[in-house]
Image: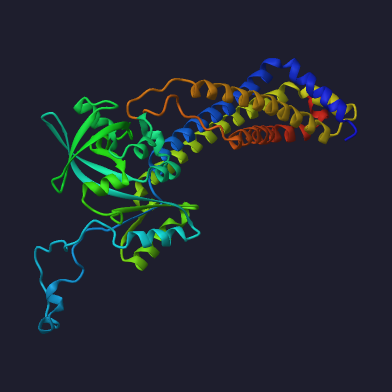
Amino acid sequence: MSNFKIILSITRIHLLTRFKQTSIAALGVTFGIGTFIILVSFMTGLNSLLDGLVLNRTPHVRVYNEIKPSSKQAIEFANEYAEAFHVIHSIKPKLSQTRIHNALPMINAFLADERVKGISPQCAAQVFYLAGSLELNGRITGINVEEEVGLFNFQEYVVEGKPEDLIKTSNGVLLGAGIAKKMSLHLGDRIQVNSSSGGRFALKIVGIFQSGLAEIDDVQSYVNLRTAQTFLGEGKDYISDINIKLWDMEEAPSMAKEIEAQFNVSAIDIKTANAQFDTGTSIRNLITYAVSITLLVVAGFGIYNILNMLIYEKMNDIAILKATGFSGRDVQWIFLSQAFIIGLIGGILGLLLGFVVSVMIDNTPFVTDALPTITTYPIDYNPMYYIIGIVFALSSTFFAGYLPAKKAKNIDPVDIIRGQ
């Protein structure tokens, strides 16, 4: 374009002579983009936090032995009643242990699967916590500490002590925060535990565990896997749960079905176990993006209105430009370049505003007993949000300026002069 420098010069003069309108248009983009960055960063950060609280501690596939009524009742085995219509009342669960039979060979088979990232076996025991005259019903789960820390970020929920202390102390326990509070117990204290088989054990509190869910923290504690097996008077092959972490979470549903069919055990995948939670996350994300896009669209309409009014104010200038040899295309580029500059300046300022406010939110103290490991409000600094912001700023201002610029292109200077 031969008149490129002249067009930019005229554009600069137009923007500076109507500095107030230009500033308002740029600020509209700035606050629109800035609010978009703040809102989407905070809401996605919050969603990631909530997802992490659930998904980080949830295995992709949980294998267990579900106690349920037998699918085939005793009368169905009798030949004399084979052709009869069976009516059975008060069906009771079949006699079965909660243990997973042949657990160790199953674990080896899972570890050989290329889809599996890691395995964490567990052994759960129903117990009574005793402290003085106080007795509380609860649950102790034996875990492989190293696997739990490596696969499920277990260390993030230990608010006092260290998970590794369970390895060093054979009779150590990570006591639930709710239990410790009710029994006035602290790090280093001892607690008596009665197992369901009648045995009594003395455990040393090497840490305090807090998940943020009161119904869990009031009953749940963790010990070394071998310690839990000792509670139940069982050997090293006694496993009640096998938690599987996959490289790709999307493969969990199909793998759970394969395990049930191959090993005759119950297996539940993470998507089935957290279906309602996933739905809530999707709805929150949908609302976040809907509100954010609305803010950007509103800013675009503001730019359109300002440029449209600017053309009416510049009718005489347009007539003079065309009368002196500027083409309609040149006039169109003058107003398009104004829209582009407004979008660029407003977009960059909006990104800076969004980033600065996001940093301020990220450093704002957030203290709650329900989430002891969270100290500040969550923010997601995903670069893609900033790329989306600047692209939308430029594209929205371009389209907002296109119609007024096209209108200016088609103005007949003769009609304007006659009107004067």
- Give the quadrant of the C terminus: top right
Image height of 345 relative to 51, above or below: above
Q: Position of residue 165 (x, y in %)?
A: 36, 35
Q: Position of residue 233 (x, y in %)?
A: 21, 51
How many callouts does the rendering have?
0
| Front one among 295 and 316 | 295
Q: How is the rendered protein coloured?
A: rainbow
Does 111 sit left or right of 321 as displayed? Answer: left
Residue 171, quarter of the rendered image: top left
| Front one among 305 and 36 | 36
- Which residue is painted at 55% across and 30% down in the image? 36
- Which residue is painted at 48% across and 35% down in the image? 44
Image height of 163 relative to 369, above or below: below
| Front one among 18 and 68 | 68
Image height of 68 relative to 196, above or below: below
The answer to whether residue 283 shows anywhere in this view is no
Residue 156, quarter of the rendered image: top left
Q: Position of residue 402 (x, y in %)?
A: 70, 35
Does 49 sit left or right of 227 as displayed? Answer: right
- Give the quadrant of the N terminus: top right
- Which residue is painted at 87% across and 27% down in the image? 5
The answer to whether residue 333 shows anywhere in this view is yes
Q: Position of residue 322 (x, y in %)?
A: 85, 29
- Which residue is painted at 57% across and 32% down in the image? 296
